[in-house]
Amino acid sequence: MDAGADATLTDADCNNSLHAAAKNNHTGIVRELLTRSLVPIDSLGGENWSALHYASSEGHAEVAAILAESKADLNAVTSNGESSLMLATRLNHWSVVKVLVRSKANLDVVANDGETALRISLKKDYKNIYEFLLENGANTDL
């Protein structure tokens, strides 16, 4: 970036450098992009995915924590209505689930298909996530 690279450029799916850094677990680049305000933290790429969606779906807890601490929208949803918590839950990324819940993500987001993080954890038999969501107040009536 010091060599004059344009951090705001996007690929064919509208994903930018922050999306790529988050998806590929490049914590240093994520920090630099955020510190220098080179890319909006909640910018959306393909399918309305944010950097936090990518970090969550890939299981990158440290990147998710950096984004959460930097005030990323924890409750932004993809074009399918899935939150970062739902993506982390679906893929059994326990460490990311803990980061998101402790950062006060909404536990009760309902996706377009009617699923919630709690329902996903129950269906997939991810007992640790299910119990953790319940302990932290997930709504069982949704």
Image (spheres, rainbow, N blue to C red):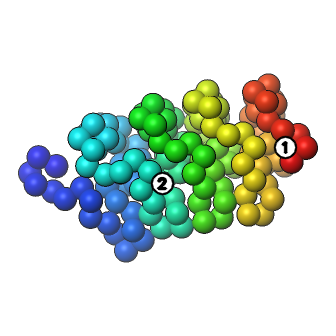
Tell me the quarter of the picture where residue 15 sits. bottom left
Q: Residue at x 37, y 74 (%)?
A: 12
**Of residues 126 and 35, which is closer to you in this image?**
35
Q: Residue 64, position in %: x, y?
A: 49, 38
Q: Residue at x 32, y 66 (%)?
A: 10
Say left or right for 38 vs 19.
left
Q: Residue at x 27, y 44 (%)?
A: 37
Of callouts 1 and 2, the N-terminal one: 2
The amino acid pointed to by label 1 is Leu
How many neighbours does mark 1 have within 10 angstroms: few (below 14), some (14-19), or many (20 or more)?
A: some
How many neighbours does mark 2 have within 10 angstroms: few (below 14), some (14-19), or many (20 or more)?
A: many
Q: Residue 79, position in %: x, y?
A: 60, 66
> Marks 2 and 1: in contact by CB < 8 Å?
no
Q: Which mark is residue 122?
A: 1
The amino acid pointed to by label 2 is Ser
Q: Residue 25, position in %: x, y?
A: 40, 43
Of tags 1 and 2, the one toward the viewer is 2
Q: Which mark is residue 27?
A: none
Tell me the quarter of the picture where residue 9 sits. bottom left
Q: What secondary structure is marked by label 1? A: helix
Q: What secondary structure is marked by label 2? A: loop
Q: Which mark is residue 50?
A: 2
Taking the view exactly as shown, the residue that stands out farthest to the left is 3
Say left or right for 1 vs 91.
left
Residue 91 visible in the displayed image: no
Say left or right for 107 vs 70.
right
Q: Residue 8, position in %: x, y?
A: 27, 59
